Amino acid sequence: MALITVTFFKSFRLTKKMSKKPTNTESKLPLGIGIGMAIGTAVGVATDKIALWIPIGLAMGISIGLAMSGSEKNKKD
């Protein structure tokens, strides 16, 4: 299993280096997902319904990340 994972990441890194397209390195989506997961986990632990609140936190995080990314695109234009 570890060999498959290492091989996958090596091939992903090589294809990323080979692509000539510029990438958006300032995406706020991972930050939003992290914030949403933290909120969902905290509420889930507090209410003892963690299986319910983790997906809700993930959805909130995706929304937060996309909103933050969208607001930056509007500023650049």
Image (cartoon, helix red, strand yellow):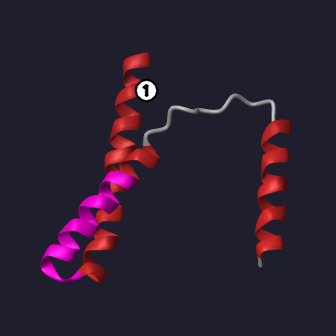
Q: Nearer the viewer, residue 66 or 10?
A: 10
Residue 32 within the magenta-colored segment of the rendering:
no
SS label for mark 1: helix
Check the image and name the residue furthest to the left: 47
Q: Nearer the viewer, residue 63 or 17?
A: 17
Q: Residue at x 24, y 60 (%)?
A: 39
Check the image and name the residue furthest to the front: 2
Q: Is residue 48 left or right of residue 37?
A: left
Q: From this view, report whether residue 68 is shown above or below residue 73.
A: below
Q: Could you say where residue 25 lies in the image, as x and y percent from the top left? A: 57, 33
Q: Specify whether residue 52 is in view.
A: yes
Q: Specify whether residue 77 is in view.
A: no
Q: From this view, report whether residue 47 is shown above or below residue 57.
A: below
Q: Residues within 10 Å of mark 1 (few under 14, many from 20)?
A: few
Q: Amino acid at mark 1?
A: Lys
Q: Main secondary structure of the magenta part?
A: helix
Give the total of numbered labels: 1
Q: Quadrant of the rendered structure where residue 74 is?
A: top left
Q: Residue at x 40, y 45 (%)?
A: 31
Residue 40 within the magenta-colored segment of the rendering:
yes
Q: Is residue 46 left or right of residue 13?
A: left
Q: From this view, report whether residue 8 is shown above or below residue 46.
A: above
Q: Quadrant of the rendered structure where residue 36 is?
A: bottom left
Q: Could you say where residue 37 lies in the image, as x and y percent from the top left? A: 34, 62
Q: Quadrant of the rendered structure where residue 28 is?
A: top left
Q: Residue at x 34, y 30 (%)?
A: 71
Q: Quadrant of the C terminus?
A: top left
Q: Which residues are magenta?
A: 34-49
Residue annotated with mark 1: 73
